[in-house]
Amino acid sequence: MTDRFRPDIIIRDRSGSPIAVVEVKRRATAHDGRELDQLRHYMAAMGDPDTFGILADPDNIRIYRGNASSDSSPIIIASPGILRLYDADYDSQIIYESYLASLVEAWLNDLSIHWKSEHPPGEDLLPKELVTRLQAA
């Protein structure tokens, strides 16, 4: 994968295998298939059918299990409810893509090592396999 065509975040386990590919968008992506196509491309490029795909925007975080092409019903979690823990002013500011990526990365790290909270927001909504793999990474 070239630097120009890379996902915003790649989470890998200790052996280097991909756990999740994250693509962050500044605007809500509910009705735009281009973002999902981009995520599908990145997931396929990882070469591991067990890689999760995460598409995040200021409104929602969508989690796709394995192959985003065949997962027509992703888990959808409201971004403010998750990311407010990492920035209390989340609702009162313009969230730019790079900052949103930082907040999503903080959340994923919290899911992995519980640095901010004993039970990070949304943990109970995610597939157990994803949480287990993040914690083992």
Image: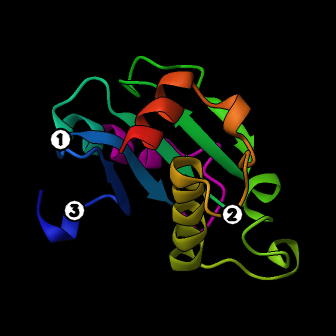
- Work out whether 40 lies above or below 80: above
Going from N to C along the chain, the mark reached first, 3 or 2, is 3
Please tell me whether mark 3 or mark 2 is closer to you in this view: 2
Queried whether the magenta region covers residue 32, the answer comes back as yes
Q: Quadrant of the N terminus?
A: bottom left
Which residue is under mark 1?
45
Read off the magenta span.
25-40
Outermost residue, left direction?
2
> Label 1's element?
helix
At 47% from the left and 41% from the top, the residue drawn is: 135
Quarter location, residue 23: bottom left
Task: Residue type at mark 2: give it.
Answer: Lys
Going from N to C along the chain, the mark reached first, 1 or 2, is 1
- Mark 3, residues whose alpha carbon is within 10 Å: few (<14), some, or many (≥20)? few
Residue 26 at x, y percent in the picture: 59, 68
Task: Residue type at mark 1: give it.
Answer: Ala
Queried whether the magenta region covers residue 42, the answer comes back as no
Going from N to C along the chain, the mark reached first, 1 or 3, is 3
Q: Quadrant of the C terminus?
A: top left
Residue 116's label in the rendered image is: 2
Residue 130's label in the rendered image is: none
Residue nearest the observer in this picture, 101 or 107: 107
Residue 64 appears in the rendering: no
At 80% from the left and 73% from the top, the residue drawn is: 90
Which residue is under mark 3?
5
